[in-house]
Image (cartoon, rainbow, N blue to C red):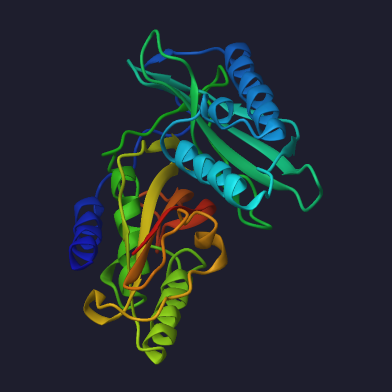
Amino acid sequence: MAALAALAAATLLSVQGCDPGTPAQAAAPGHVAITQAQAQAVYQSYLQVSDGAAAAGAITAGLSQLTSAAWEISHAEYISMENTGVPVPRYVYGTPQFFIPRLDGYPHWFVVAVPRHAADGGSTATALMAFTQLSAHAKWTLNGEADLAAGQPAPAIARDSEGYATSVAPGDQSVLVQPNAVGATQAAVVDEGPGSPAAALINAGPRTTGWYGQLAAQATSASAQQLDFTWQMQGSSYPVYALRSADGGAVVLYGMLLNTTTQHPNHQLGSAIPVPGSPQSLLPTGEIAYHAYFVNETWEFALIDPPASARDGKLSIIAASGGPTYVHAY
C-alpha cells in the first residue's frame, strides 16, 4: 500500500510543470481503424448475442463476446445465477454515441456511451462500453463497461473535424496523472484513506475515501467478533483506454481488483465464519470458512483526468461497475 502511495506522489512530481498537450480540436495522428457503421455493427451484434444468452441463461454464449474485466464480471453473474436461480440482468438500451479514435496499429478499440435501464424496470444510467480488436483476424469483444453515477453527465469527449476522437497514450504527461497511473492513485486512497499523499490528486467520493471508510468499518466490526479483516486494491493487466476530453484532459477507462480476507487470527481453526450474501452466491458447494474466506472483486472505472495545467485539478471518478468475481473458503 505504501508503494502505491509513493507511485501516486511520484506521478504528481513527474507531471507538474509540463506543457499542456495539443488542443482537443486539432486533428490527431493515426488512421481510422473502424468506421462508425462498422462500430455500430459490432455494438448491435454484442447486444443481440448478450441479451439472447442472458434470456436463456447460456453461459458459453453469454461470455463469447467478452474479455478482460467484462468477462470476469459477467462470468460471476452466470455463476451466481447457477447457484441461486436469480437471472442474469437484461437491459433496454437507448441511443448510443460512438467515440472512435484514430490509432496507429493494434489493438483497435472504440468507446460507446449509451443510456440503459434494467429490462424489469429501474432508473436509467449511462454505460461507457469499451470494445477491442486485438489483431487483424481477432473478433471484436467488449472488454470493459462502467455505469455513470446517478446525476453524472456524460463526459465531453473531443472530436476532430471529421468526427473522430483522439486517443491519449498510457504514459501521456499532458494530463494531471498519466493514464496508466490513475488506478494506483485511486488504490492508494482506498487502501490508506484520506491521509494518503495520493489524496491530493483525486477527489473524495464513494470509490475513494468512501470505500476506505466502508472497509475500515468492516475491519472494526470483524475485530469486535475476534476476527481479522484486511483489504487491498491492486492493479490488473486489463487494458487502459483514454480519450482526449474537450478541455484538453482525458477520459480514462481502466480495471482494478479489490481483494479482502476475513479470518480467525493467524488462520487458526475456529467456528464457521458467515459469508455475506453477494460473495455467498459465488462460494463453491461444500466450502465452509472454519479458518478464513477470501473475496476477489473485479471493477471497471471511468474518470476525468484534468489537463496538467489545470489549477487545483484532481482526478474525478465518474463511473463504476463490478463486484465479487471469486470467493474461496476453508
At 72% from the left and 39% from the top, the residue drawn is: 91
Residue 227 sits above or below residue 57 on the image: below
Instruction: Looking at the picture, tell me which residue is in the foreground, 296 or 178.
Output: 296
At 64% from the left and 23% from the top, the residue drawn is: 49
At 70% from the left and 27% from the top, the residue drawn is: 52
Q: Is residue 249 visible?
A: no
Q: Is residue 317 visible?
A: yes
- Quarter holding the N terminus is bottom left
View extreme (top): residue? 137
- Quarter holding the C terminus is bottom left
Residue 35 sits above or below residue 13 on the image: above
Residue 243 sits above or below residue 209 on the image: above
Instruction: Looking at the picture, tell me which residue is in the foreground, 197 or 211.
Output: 211
Indicate left or right for 109 with 118 as reference: left
User: How far across and how far down the image is residue 134, in percent?
Assistant: 37, 19
User: How far across and how far down the image is residue 156, in percent?
Assistant: 57, 41
Indicate left or right for 116 with 131 as reference: right
At 56% from the left and 16% from the top, the residue drawn is: 162
Instruction: Looking at the picture, tell me which residue is in the foreground, 105 or 63.
Output: 63
User: How far across and how far down the image is residue 259, in percent?
Assistant: 35, 60
User: How far across and how far down the image is residue 258, in percent?
Assistant: 38, 58
Indicate left or right for 129 with 18 as reference: right
